[in-house]
Image (cartoon, helix red, strand yellow):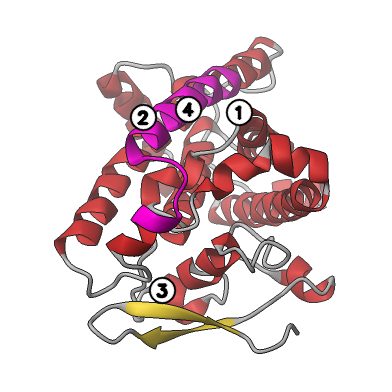
Amino acid sequence: LCASIHSHSKVPDLLFPLLHLRRSAAMALGMPEELLPVIIPTIVYWIVSGIYTILWYSSDKHRLFTQEDEDAKNLVTRRRAVAVVLLNQSAQVAIVALSFWVRKGKGDDDAESRPPPSLVRLAWQLMVGLLFVDTWQYFWHRLIHESEFLYKHVHYMHHHMVVPYTYGAQFTHPVDMIVADTISNTLAAHITGMSPWTTTFFFIVHILKSLDDHSGLWFPNSPYSRLLSNNSAWHASHHQLDGSKHNFSVLFLNIWDKLLGTYRPCTVERREGGGYQLRAAAKDL
């Protein structure tokens, strides 16, 4: 399979200017390419979180929960969440950057001389990476819910947010963060041979989806809401007290939930007074 992909991965002459462009971009940012997958996604995380937070506080039009719900149900303050997320991101930056430097030191990744991947290879890398991370995170997420010890000492921290909000997406125990996010995404990047630039894009795609899932907001016409059943409402239902045994899929797909009997659909209804509210299925599928 890999040989077949490589045989169709010759880069058209038109794409070679991208090689110079990406070098110039890295130089303009003042950092080696190996740092791009950790620095840029982290910046995106906080910029997009800020946008969602402004939307949350500016109007209740798209809220899945009221401010009263958050105040009454959540066991962690937003200030505490920010501190934990920054700590987790610091560890994540160190681990991912180290993994790319090790790979470069072994000669497996010569980012400066490697031509940009073809669209076929790029699509293959992203698709395989997505499936790998979806599978990894489903089984890890299910394990830490079904293990009383792991749930109590590791994952319950994340469920202090019964009412999720965007920048709380990475409010997790450091062990949970490293195993669920850092290791799974880093392995996906290295297994598929992603360049630092492709890895950066892959991480950003993951972050944008995770931020939307934890936003506590519902936009009926957004691509996530219209095209995916694994969306912000579906994940918010998992954060509810009666939802912890269902909906373990984290990223884009919910194939494993449907195959293994942990899928529970939910609907979104207009809330009297403005905004939306969740309605879980009457019985599990």
Q: What stretch is highlighted in magenta?
A: 71-96
- Mark 4: which amino acid? Gln
* 108 left or right of 162 in image: right
**Mark 3 surroundings: few (<14), some (14-19) or many (≥20) residues within 10 A:** few
CB-based contact (under 8 Å), mark 1 and mark 2? no
Secondary structure found at label 3:
helix
- What residue sits right under mark 2 in the picture? 20
User: Which of labels 2 and 3 is toward the front?
Assistant: 3
- What residue sits right under mark 1 in the picture? 174
Q: Where is residue 168 in the image (x, y as percent from the top left)?
A: 43, 45
Q: From what the image shows, is residue 98 above or below residue 250? A: above
Please state which of residues 127 and 42 is positioned toward the viewer in this rendering.
42
CB-based contact (under 8 Å), mark 4 and mark 3? no
Quick one: which residue is furthest to the front in this view? 72
- What residue sits right under mark 3 in the picture? 223
Secondary structure found at label 2:
helix
Q: Which of marks 4 and 1 is nearer the N terminus?
A: 4
- What residue sits right under mark 4 in the picture? 89
Which image quadrant: the C terminus?
bottom right
Q: From what the image shows, is residue 110 above or below residue 1? A: above
**Mark 1 surroundings: few (<14), some (14-19) or many (≥20) residues within 10 A:** some
Q: Which of marks 4 and 3 is nearer the N terminus?
A: 4
User: Which of labels 1 and 2 is toward the front?
Assistant: 1
Quick one: which residue is furthest to the top in this view? 105
Q: Distance between the residues labelled 2 and 4?
A: 30 Å
Q: How far apart are marks 1 and 2 (CA)?
A: 38 Å
**Mark 4 surroundings: few (<14), some (14-19) or many (≥20) residues within 10 A:** many
Secondary structure found at label 4:
helix
- Mark 3: which amino acid? Pro
